[in-house]
Image: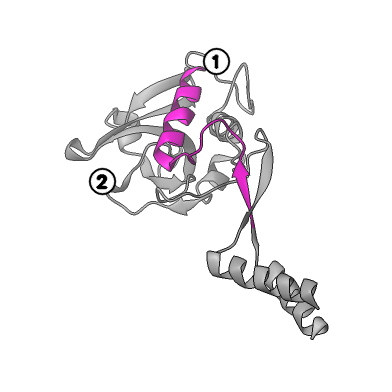
Amino acid sequence: MITTIIAYIFLSLSSVVISPIHNSDSTSVSSPQSEADRIIDEAKKYLGLPYHYGSTGPKSFDCSGFTSFIFKKFGYSIGRSSRDQAHDGVAVKKGFKNLRKGDIVVFGSRRDKNYVGHVGILIEADPKNKDFTFIHADHSGVVITRLKSPYYSSRYLGARRILPDSDSTTVKEDPSDSLYLKFQTDSLQAEMLKAALDSLISE
C-alpha cells in the first residue's frame, strides 16, 4: 500500500509544470504589441548614429547589425546578416494589413532587388495607402523611412515576425531578467495529492 502511494505521489509531482516567469514589478506578462513599442522606442534612441559596414553598435551600425543589436536587448537572438534575418522568426503573410509593429522588413540589394540586401524594423503600417514607416541603418546612418520612397518601394520583399504572433501570455527567455520557478497544478491534482499524503501519514 505504501509503495503504491509513493508511486502515485511521484507521478503526481512529475506532472507539475515548471514555467519561467518574468520577475518584475508588474503582475501581467507584456503583450507582443507593448513589447514592440518598447523595441521601437529603444531603436529611436540611436537615430542619427553613423553607418559603418560590419558594425554592430553601439556607436555605429550596418543594417543587420542594428536590428540584431536592438532585438538582443530584449532577449531575442537573430542572425547577423540580412540574409539570415530574412529567414528568422516566421514569414508574415503578404498584404499590408498583416504587418505589425516590430516586424523585420526585408529589402533587395542595390545590385539585385530580388536578392536580400537590407533589413529594418517596422514602426507603423498604413494598409490603406500600402505604405509603412521603418527604422533602419542605411548609408546615411540610423534613420526612419517610408516605404514609398522610390528606392525602397521597388525593393520590398516581405517581412518576418520575431515577436510572438498572439497576445497570449507567452513567456520568453530574457537574460536581463531574473527568473523564478512557478509550480502550476490544477485543483484536482492538489486535492488528490493531499489525500495520498494523508493516507501515507496515517499508515
The residue where tag 1 is placed is 50
Front-most of residues 184 and 47: 184
Residue at 35% of width from left, 41% of height from top?
Answer: 100
Look at the numbered disc 1 and give the secondary structure of its residue: loop
Q: Tell me the residue at 53%/30% (across/down).
A: 63
**Rendered location of residue 195, percent (x, y):** 66, 72
Magenta stretch? 18-46
| Residue 40 drawn above or below residue 10 | above
N-terminal of the two: label 1 or label 2?
1
Query: Which structural element holds mark 2?
Result: helix
Q: Residue furthest bottom?
A: 1
Instruction: Name the kind of residue labelled 2 in the image.
Output: Lys
**The furthest residue to the front:** 202
Residue 110: image location, x then y, percent: 44, 35
Residue 191 on image: x %, y %: 59, 68
At a point 22% along the width and 39% down the height, the residue shown is: 130
Residue at (44%, 47%) from the top-left corner? 160
Disc nearest the viewer among 1 and 2: 2
Q: Write down the residue under mark 2.
A: 97
Q: Nearer the viewer, residue 81 or 196?
A: 196
What whole-number distance in Å separates the C-alpha atoms at marks 1 and 2?
32 Å
Residue 58 on the magenta segment? no
| Among the 4 quarters of the image, the one containing residue 21 | top right
Q: Is residue 176 above or below residue 43?
A: below
| Badge 1 amino acid | Pro
* Residue 143 position within the rendered picture, expressed as x and y whole percent measured from the top left: 43, 20
Q: Nearer the viewer, residue 192 or 155?
A: 192
35 over 86 or under it: above or below: above
Residue 88 is marked as: none
